[in-house]
Amino acid sequence: MLKFNLFLTTTAGVSLLSTTVFSQRTIQKQPNILVILADDLGYGDVSCYGAKHISTPNIDRLAKEGLRFTNGFATSATCTPSRYALLTGIYPWRKKAAVLPGDAPLIIEPQSLTLPRMLQNAGYTTGVVGKWHLGLGNGNTDWNQKVVPGANETGFNYSFIQAATNDRVPCVYLENGLVVDLDPKDPISVSYKENFTGEPTGKQNPELLKMHPSHGHDFSIVNGISRIGYMKGGKSAHWIDENMADTFLTKSIGFIKANRTKPFFLYYALHQPHVPRVPNSRFVGKSGMGPRGDAILEADWCIGKMLDAMEEMGLNENTLIIFSSDNGPVIDDGYKDQAVELLGNHIPAGPLRGGKYSMFEGGTRVPFIVRWKGAIKPGVSDALVCQMDFLASFSDLLGQKIDKNVDSKDVLQALLGKTKTGRSDLVIEGMGNLAYKQGDWVLIPKYKGESYMPLTGTETGRSGEDQLYHLSDDLGERVNLAGKEANRVVKMKAALETISGIKPN
Ligand code: NG6
Ligand code: CA
């Protein structure tokens, strides 16, 4: 049952009523949970984390009214693994989760006790709106039929999603497994191997493009933008990038409206500022930083609209809202959108080294804000917390049992601001390589491979030398202490091996 006296007093006050009413009231006092997850938004991309050249008033409002974590993490520096951990409570590299193509099968075990399923067990109605990128179906998906298993089979009562990302086909929305607005006379075909005869591509027909690729992304063209992968048909179902934010926002608010009288969980997975960055015309030119900055302003606006809608519905007090990002920032991630040219003095990763794809902190340390009005005292916390911990933490809050073998740790008291002690350690992952954080220290064992991503220019963190950084003196990871602290390196490697089962080099 709930762990808060504030709720128990409410129920005690109705002790004369029947048990049914008692338990119903108890359930109604379970907080709604709203997780808002941005895509590729960096630690330094929002003003409440220090951005000076862009203003995000709505995210700042969440931070002002909630607890802002300075040491909040995704497990991984790319999307699929990071989201896998958030939803399953399991380190993604245990399942070799990596960035998926748009036709990949579902990588979450449909029967497993995911975060949404645990919440369903606790009486919640659960929904996901936005980016999915965890695979759908069993392979060889026919997009003209109901696609199962999908989000609904992992514990969501409702889903309105992109199959993968906004840069991958199929460029359509799926609602509860069915492609939205599909005309059966114009069926969809998808391939990640070869083009369909006669279909234009970004590579062969650049004259058809309104946004050009800088690397990759030169396959099928949808809405004047070439993507990754080939797709044919389904024209009436194609999304319009410019309307995507409004579509996801409307669906999210719709889900909340429909379920507001009982506890709900919504995973609102924003698509911004992932490439292709195509904000609505209302935001074009507003940041002075080109589409990347404009997309961040659009995401911030969506959050403001969501908060307004919650307030109007009287849901502010009893909703726990988390805002975070799935991985760190990247500037040129494959389209010529002037992100590099117009960046100016803005630093997307803030004080951190690296970004998306990186084992350095910029890859996984992300904005991380928890607001629960009346229950969480506003402030700042430096407790080490990870999105993977939502499963164990909320199961504690709601008195639900979960598998003891998950990697998710119960950091509920830290999330609620009752303690500054979070996790003692965390394994982080960049492009399949593991680094290990323990207290103030981070170890990046030596790895073969590029130290920079050849296409995006981001530092991967790979080096022929072990790297050890002491973050409280050196947040930017500039002074390698591996030589001076050889014993610590040995001990941390041993601990990493114990957790991961993988022997570091
Ligand atoms: C990369 C894509 C990049 C982005 C990323 C996944 C190319 C050249 N680059 O392979 O644009 O889609 O995958 O991003 O195709 S994530 O945020 O979903 O992990
Ligand atoms: Ca991402």
Image (tube, rainbow, N blue to C red):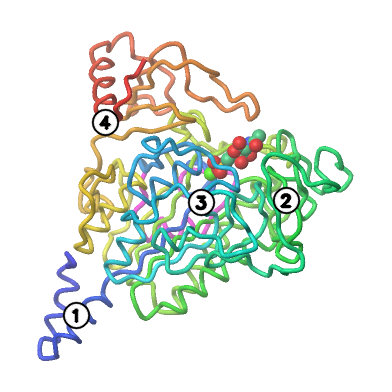
Q: Which residue is mark 1?
A: 23
For the residues carrying marks 4 and 3, which lies nearer the camera in this image? 3
Q: Which residue is mark 3?
A: 138
Residue 50 belongs to magenta span: yes
- The residue at 24%/27% (across/down) is 498
- Give SS at disc 2: strand
Q: Which mark is residue 499?
A: 4
- The residue at 42%/23% (across/down) is 477
Quadrant of residue 329 within the rendered picture: top right
Residue type at mark 3 is Asn
Give how far across and how far down residue 374 sits, in percent: 28, 68
Give how far across and how far down residue 140 sits, in percent: 59, 50
- Give SS at disc 3: loop
Q: Which residue is mark 2?
A: 231
* Badge 1 or badge 4: first in the primary sequence: 1
Residue at the limit of the structure toward the top, as seen here:
483
Give how far across and how far down residue 196 sits, in percent: 78, 47
Mark 2 neighbour class, 10 Å CA radius: few under 14, some 14 to 19, many 20 or more: many
* Badge 1 or badge 3: first in the primary sequence: 1
Mark 3 neighbour class, 10 Å CA radius: few under 14, some 14 to 19, many 20 or more: some
Numbered marks: total: 4
For the residues carrying marks 2 and 3, which lies nearer the camera in this image? 3
- Give SS at disc 4: helix
* Badge 1 or badge 2: first in the primary sequence: 1
